[in-house]
Amino acid sequence: MNKILSGCGIAALFLVGLLVSCGRQENANDIPDTGNIKISYTSYPFYKDLAAIDTNHIGEGLQQLKSKYPGFLDFYLDTMMGFDFRTVYTDTNKMIHGFLTMKDYRNLLDTVVIAFPDTRKYDDWLQQSFRYIKYYDSTFVLPQHVYYFVSGLRGITAALQSDQNIWVGLDMFLGQDFFPYQQLNKSSSETIRMTPENIPVWVCRALYDDKYPFIPEDKNLLGLMVEKGKELYFLEKVTPYLKEEVRFGFTPEQLKWCKEHEAFVYNLFLKNNLLFENNLQKTMRYVSDGPAVPGLPGDSPGNVGSFIGWRIVKQYAERNNISMHQLLETKDARKILEGAGYKP
C-alpha cells in the first residue's frame, strides 16, 4: 500500500531552515482522558543516521544502515529516490557516492538535521493523536513504526507504506519562509501547511484518507463540503493540542473571516444554486486550498467551503449524539445537513 503524495524532484535545494512554534487551542474539558489506552509506537531517525554516514566509507555505512533498516533502506534508495542500487553498497559505487555528496542534497539533509535535532516533540504529539483515534474509532488501523526521512523535496509529507509503517518527510516541514519552497513555486496556501506543527495534521490526514479517500466525482457541492467537513471534524478530535487554524490550513485572520462570514457564504451558495451543483469546475475551488474564489471578498480563503462543511458535520454530530464511527460511515450528505438543523 505505497501511498506517496506527489511532488517535485530534487531541484533548487538551498541551505535554509525555520522552526515554527505552536500552542494549545482546545478547552481541556473537551479533551478525553486517554492515559489508559495502549498503543504500539516506535520512531526511527533515518534522516540522522543517513546524514551521519562517513562518505569516505560509504559502503560500510550503508551496510550498517541496512542492518538497522532492513525493510526501508532499499525502498528509500531504489523506489523513493529512483536509484537502482539493489543492495550493492560499496565504496566504489560512484552513483551512491555522488548521491550522498551532491551539494544540494547534502545541504538539504544538513538543514533538516539542524532544524530537527530530535523528534521527541512530534513523537509525543503523534502518540497522543493515535490514542485519540483509538478512543474515538477503534476500527482505524494504527501504524506501529514511524520513519523520519528526507525526500529531496519530492512533496512527501506523510505516507503509508503499509498498515504498520508510515513515513514523515521532514524536508516538507521547514517553515513557510524556507527559500527552496519559493524556488519550487509553492504558493502561500501550500507553504502554510509546511511548518513543523503540521506534522501530526499530515500524518492523521494520511490515516484518514487511507480509510476514507476523498472521491469528488459524482458529488455536488454539499457532498464535497460534508466529506471535507468530516475530515476536519476528525482532525479536531485527534489533534486538540494544535491551534485551530493549523488544522484548516488558514491564517488566524482567515479563520476569523470564516467565522464572521459563515452565514454570508452559506447564503451565497443558496442564492446561486450552488449547494446541489455537480459541476466540479464550479465547486472544487470552494473545498480546495488557494486564494479567494470569484464572488467572495479577497481576504477570504479558497477553502471556505470546507469550513462550512465542518460546521455542518460538527453540528450534526453534537445534535444527534453519535459516535465518530457512525458519523464517518454516514454517506448521505443531505441527511447530515437536515439532521444538523444547520441555519447559520
Image: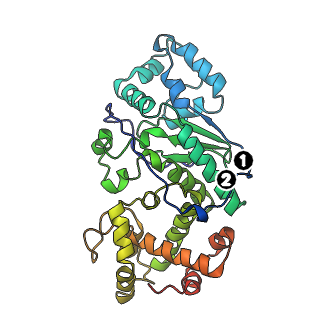
Of the 4 image quadrants, the one containing the C terminus is bottom left
Q: Residues within 10 Å of mark 1 (few under 14, many from 20)?
A: some
- What residue lies at 58% left-to-right and 29% top-to-bottom? 73
- What residue lies at 29% left-to-right and 68% top-to-bottom? 292
Callouts 1 and 2 close, C-beta under 8 Å: yes
Q: Is residue 284 left or right of residue 69?
A: left
The image's mark for residue 126 is none
* Residue 248 versus residue 341 in the image, above or below: above
Amino acid at pointer 2: Arg
Q: Residues within 10 Å of mark 2 (few under 14, many from 20)?
A: many
* Displayed quadrant of residue 250: bottom left
Secondary element under disc 1, as helix, strand or loop, is loop
Of residue 303 and residue 233, the one placed in the foreground of this image is: 233
Secondary element under disc 2, as helix, strand or loop, is helix
In the rendering, at what x and y percent does residue 123 appear? 58, 42
In the rendering, at what x and y percent does residue 189 appear? 34, 57
In the rendering, at what x and y percent does residue 248 appear? 44, 62
Amino acid at pointer 1: Ile
In the rendering, at what x and y percent does residue 68 appear? 64, 25
- What residue lies at 55% left-to-right and 61% top-to-bottom? 235
Residue on which disc 2 sits: 131
The tally of labels here is 2
Spatial CA span between label 1 and label 2: 7 Å
* Displayed quadrant of residue 99: top left
Residue on which disc 1 sits: 39
Residue 185 seen in the current view: yes
